[in-house]
Amino acid sequence: MSGAFDPDYEDLPARLPVFPLTGVLLLPRGRLPLNIFEPRYLAMTQHALGAGRMIGMIQPQEAAGDAGDPPLYRTGCMGRIIEFRETEDGRFLISLLGTIRFDIATELPRHELFRSVAPDWSRWRGDLAEREPALDRDRLMAALKPYFRRHGINGDFSAIEKAPPAHLLTSLAMLCPFAPREKQALLEAVDPDTRADLLITLIEMSAHAPPGGGEAPRH
């Protein structure tokens, strides 16, 4: 459900500061807490607070790392700062609410410490209209319990079984310890139904991988 402060499609920015971070996934209507301490991202946060409170979360390409200016995946997700706090040791603690995905049309010349892109929103306009995915909850729960045991995750399964499908799907996709390329695949799923099926498949592959055999094969 859209909030009072959510932007309309026509009001989305033409310039978006981006925060490249490996293994971190933000999805529309997901909440992401961040601990900001590097000078460039402190500057990015201060800029965003005065310019609509919008930041683009995006992953560096596989194995590129976070240092310097690594090449980026094409697709990320814009988040809006909904919580902000300073710390005495010079950090910002913020929370982002995922709004809409974007594709990078081009990276813009740098005039600040942080990177900015010209975002192309057109492919993801549907993100602004939330709908519940078709989620096979029985299949999910059958895989989730051994998956949590394998990864040492404590879960409130009674709450999970009652959670609305969209909220459950987003929370699991963001919080489960998937590989960066798997998180990128979840981000780029064309619709909620596709993401739900992919999420369950990834959980099943990891939950039922042979002992001592490492992670399940990835595609």
Image: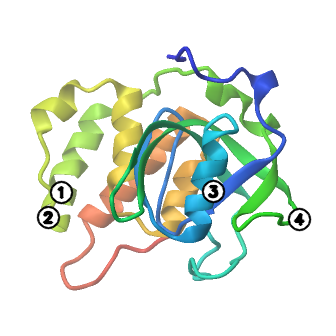
Q: Label 3 sits on what residue type?
A: Met
Identify the element where label 4 is drawn.
loop
Q: Are marks 4 and 1 in contact (CB under 8 Å)?
A: no
Question: Horizontal placement of 130 versus 171: left or right?
Answer: right
Q: Who is closer to the viewer here, 183 or 94?
A: 94
Residue depth check, mark 3 versus mark 4: number of the one nearer the observer? 3
Q: Horizontal and vertical percent for residue 4?
A: 55, 14
Q: On screen, 25 above or below 213?
A: above
Q: Earlier in the sequence, mark 2 or mark 4?
A: 4
Q: Which residue is mark 2?
A: 152
Point out which mark residue 44 bears: 3
Q: Are marks 3 and 4 in contact (CB under 8 Å)?
A: no
Per the model, the C-alpha gap separating discs 1 and 3 is 36 Å
Identify the element where label 3 is drawn.
helix
Per the model, the C-alpha gap separating discs 2 and 3 is 35 Å
Q: Earlier in the sequence, mark 1 or mark 3?
A: 3
Crowd class of label 4 (few under 14; some 14 to 19; many from 20; radius 10 Å) = few
Q: Are marks 2 and 3 in contact (CB under 8 Å)?
A: no
Q: Horizontal and vertical percent for residue 23?
A: 47, 66
**Residue at image point 20% right, 66% down:** 151
Q: Label 4 sits on what residue type?
A: Pro
Q: Which residue is mark 4?
A: 109
Q: Label 1 sits on what residue type?
A: Phe
Q: Who is closer to the viewer here, 217 or 92?
A: 92
